[in-house]
Image (cartoon, rainbow, N blue to C red):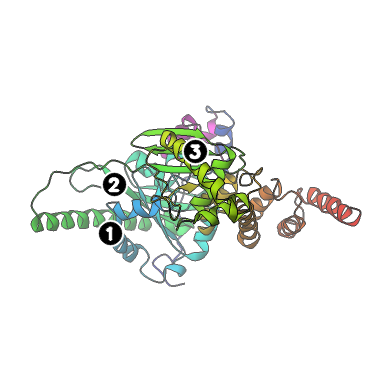
């Protein structure tokens, strides 16, 4: 490996990993006065306590705050978008796929915007939700370098077991906030995540220096822009309304609309949910005949469809007035997100554990609309195949405990092959496989 991070230097932590793990267990168990907490660095100890105050679970998965295409639009408009190439050049100057680390740039709220670097490390960290769009603030996932650096407004190093979240404890990280060069408010955070090589004094100096270089470049760019154009009064643009259709594990879908600090939730009938889902899935638009075929199973039902579309438009005027359903073809000029597409997006990013947690059940399980049935099968199959191909054994075991994976013999056998020989979980898996074999032999 040839990269800026390829020389491994063992850190000199103040306490052993075992002592920190025991202190963490005592704090999570409610023993905040346990003397073993004195063995933990004050910076980490106070962050753990803030994590408890925010009711963060010891194995909480980060919320996905930004989903595509909202994430793409937000990244383009973010103040750090113009310095991403500089950050790459300073922190991963060689082949990014062989860097041995992941380099992250997030916003002031702790939401990850860019996650780049070593392909293998990205795949492993993605499994715990370390992906673009996920929120890694202290109030979301507890102690971590990105979130704690923002909370303290200073560079921070978090080593392995010092993470509040047990899922993150295999990793170490160094992060530093990036400030507006004039107002000094926090614009975002730069983080490097990997093994022990990312928590050396040299690593902290490098990440700190990168943050300062970015601030200097932002100031220069701003000064050049002022020289090139007359001053203009900044106007706050209203936040675009965001519409999300929630169909996973629900017979009556929910339509959520948020924007400018206001959020409304409306429950939809099954037919309106089917129509909205088909239009959200086919964003290019659908003819009346094709939409009737997807919803009613009959292209000749276009007259019935048009009457239902009139009722849907009236319902949208109340629930989501910004959604204007166009005709010829039927389509929405603005995108409608769905929780099912969010799961598919998480799988594309390698965030298998988060995707499984977000999969609340099958798409509109009581719907018999042909288009819905096809989409339902597609989501279920994509989830299953992604987990079989790349997920960790813990995620596969969690999938095997869901309705979708409970009777999947291939999943159970793969879990069995991945577990250590002496794992206590093997006996239960063997019993489940034998039960399925009996059912298939004697239906």
Give left or right: position of 89 versus 365.
left
Q: Earlier in the sequence, mark 3 or mark 2?
A: 2
x 16%, y 54%: residue: 222
**Residue marked by disc 2:** 187
Q: Nearer the viewer, mark 1 or mark 3?
A: 3
In whole angstroms, how far apart are the C-alphas of marks 1 and 3?
49 Å
Magenta region includes residue 37: yes
The secondary structure that dominates the magenta segment is helix
Tell me, yes or no, if residue 16 can be seen here: no
**Residue marked by disc 3:** 311
Magenta region includes residue 66: no
Tell me, yes or no, if residue 80 can be seen here: yes
- Magenta region: which residues? 34-60
Task: Give how far across and how far down residue 283 sits, in percent.
Answer: 46, 55
Task: Give how far across and how far down residue 415 sits, in percent.
Answer: 72, 56
For mark 3, give the secondary structure. Answer: helix
- Mark 1 crowdedness (10 Å alpha carbons): few <14, some 14-19, many ≥20: some
x 59%, y 55%: residue: 299
In whole angstroms, how far apart are the C-alphas of marks 3 and 2?
45 Å
* Image mark for residue 83: 1
Q: Which residue sits furthest right?
A: 442
Q: Nearer the viewer, mark 3 or mark 2?
A: 3
For mark 1, give the secondary structure. Answer: helix
């Amino acid at each position: 490996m040839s990269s800026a991070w390829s020389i491994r230097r063992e850190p000199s932590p103040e306490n052993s990993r075992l002592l920190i793990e025991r202190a963490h267990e005592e704090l999570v168990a409610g023993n905040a006065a346990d003397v073993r907490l004195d063995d933990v660095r004050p910076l980490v100890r106070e962050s753990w306590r803030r994590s408890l105050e925010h009711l963060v679970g010891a194995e909480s998965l980060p919320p996905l705050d930004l989903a595509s295409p909202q994430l793409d639009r937000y990244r383009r408009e973010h103040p750090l978008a113009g310095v991403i190439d500089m950050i790459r050049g300073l922190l991963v100057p060689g082949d990014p796929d062989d860097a041995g680390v992941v380099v992250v740039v997030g916003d002031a709220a702790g939401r990850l915007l860019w996650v780049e670097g070593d392909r293998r490390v990205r795949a492993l960290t993605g499994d715990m939700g370390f992906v673009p769009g996920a929120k890694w603030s202290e109030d979301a996932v507890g102690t971590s370098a990105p979130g704690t650096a923002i909370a303290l407004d200073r560079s921070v190093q978090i080593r392995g077991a010092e993470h509040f979240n047990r899922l993150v404890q295999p990793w170490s990280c160094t992060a530093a906030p990036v400030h507006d060069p004039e107002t000094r408010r926090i614009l975002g955070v730069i983080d490097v995540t990997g093994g022990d090589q990312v928590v050396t004094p040299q690593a902290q100096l490098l990440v700190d220096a990168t943050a300062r270089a970015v601030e200097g470049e932002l100031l220069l760019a701003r000064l050049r822009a002022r020289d090139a154009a007359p001053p203009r009064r900044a106007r706050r643009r209203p936040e675009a309304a965001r519409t999300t259709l929630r169909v996973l594990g629900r017979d009556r879908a929910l339509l959520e609309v948020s924007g400018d600090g206001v959020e409304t939730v409306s429950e939809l009938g099954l037919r309106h949910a089917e129509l909205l889902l088909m239009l959200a899935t086919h964003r290019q638009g659908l003819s009346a005949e094709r939409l009737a075929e997807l919803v009613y199973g009959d292209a000749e039902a276009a007259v019935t469809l048009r009457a239902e579309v009139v009722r849907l438009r009236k319902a949208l005027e109340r629930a989501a007035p910004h959604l204007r359903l166009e005709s010829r073809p039927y389509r929405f000029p603005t995108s409608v997100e769905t929780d099912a597409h969010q799961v598919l997006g998480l799988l594309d990013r390698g965030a298998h554990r988060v995707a499984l947690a977000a999969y609340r059940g099958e798409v509109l399980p009581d719907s018999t609309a042909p288009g819905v049935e096809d989409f339902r099968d597609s989501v279920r199959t994509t989830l299953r195949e992604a987990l079989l191909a790349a997920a960790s054994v813990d995620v596969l075991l969690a999938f095997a405990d869901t309705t979708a994976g409970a009777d999947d013999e291939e999943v159970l056998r793969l879990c069995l092959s991945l577990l250590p020989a002496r794992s206590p979980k093997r006996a239960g898996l063997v019993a489940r496989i034998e039960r399925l074999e009996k059912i298939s032999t004697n239906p």
